């Protein structure tokens, strides 16, 4: 029964979405100037995203020069 209930809920939500979309299209056709103004306001209200800043990769520390094995062995 759960699957059927989920299907009904999805169907209901889809119908509501389509209804809202149709109303928006009708309103835009009835008054295109107001629709443009509303779209511009929505765009201005959207938060501005900063571009991602890439940090340079940290350089690996060079290993300390090891004491030459030949010198210690010769002594």
Image: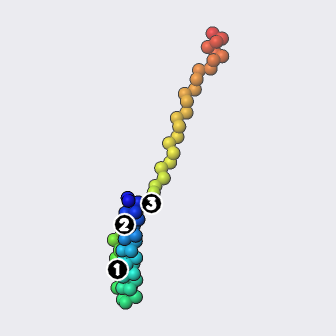
Q: Is residue 66 above or below residue 51?
A: above
Question: Does 70 sit left or right of 7 as displayed?
Answer: right
Indicate which disc, 2 or 3, sits on the residue closer to the N terminus. 2
Residue on which disc 2 sits: 9
Helix or strand or loop: what does disc 2 sit on? helix
Q: Place residue 23 in its image quadrant.
A: bottom left
Provide residue 18's location: percent of width, then percent of height.
40, 76
Residue drawn at (52%, 35%), measured in percent from left and top? 61
**Residue 41: x and y, percent?**
34, 76
Of badges 2 and 3, the one in the foreground is 2
Graded by Cα atoms within 10 Å as few (under 14), some (14 to 19) or many (20 or more), the crowding at tag 3 reads few
Tell me the residue at 38%/59% (across/down).
1
Could you say which quadrant of the image residue 2 lies in? bottom left
Task: Name the residue tied to disc 3.
Answer: 51
What colouring style does the render use? rainbow
Query: Alpha-carbon distance for marks 2 and 1?
Result: 31 Å
Labels 2 and 1 touching (C-beta < 8 A): no
Are the residues at dot 1 and dot 3 in contact (C-beta closer than 8 Å)?
no
Other residues around mark 2 within 10 Å, as few (<14) / some (14–19) / many (≥20): few
Relative to 7, residue 73 above or below: above
Residue 54 point in image, percent of width and height: 48, 53
Task: Return the residue found at the far top.
Answer: 75
Q: Which residue is mark 1?
A: 38
Looking at the image, which is closer to me, 29 or 58?
29
Q: Is residue 2 above or below residue 14?
A: above
- Asked if residue 22 can be seen in this view, the reply is yes
């Amino acid at each position: 029964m759960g699957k059927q209930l989920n299907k009904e809920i999805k169907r209901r939500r889809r119908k509501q979405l389509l209804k809202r979309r149709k109303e928006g299209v009708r309103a835009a056709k009835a008054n295109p100037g107001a629709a443009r103004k509303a779209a511009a306001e929505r765009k201005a209200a959207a938060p501005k995203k900063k571009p991602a800043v890439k940090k340079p990769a940290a350089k690996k520390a060079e290993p300390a020069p090891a004491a030459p094995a030949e010198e210690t062995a010769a002594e």
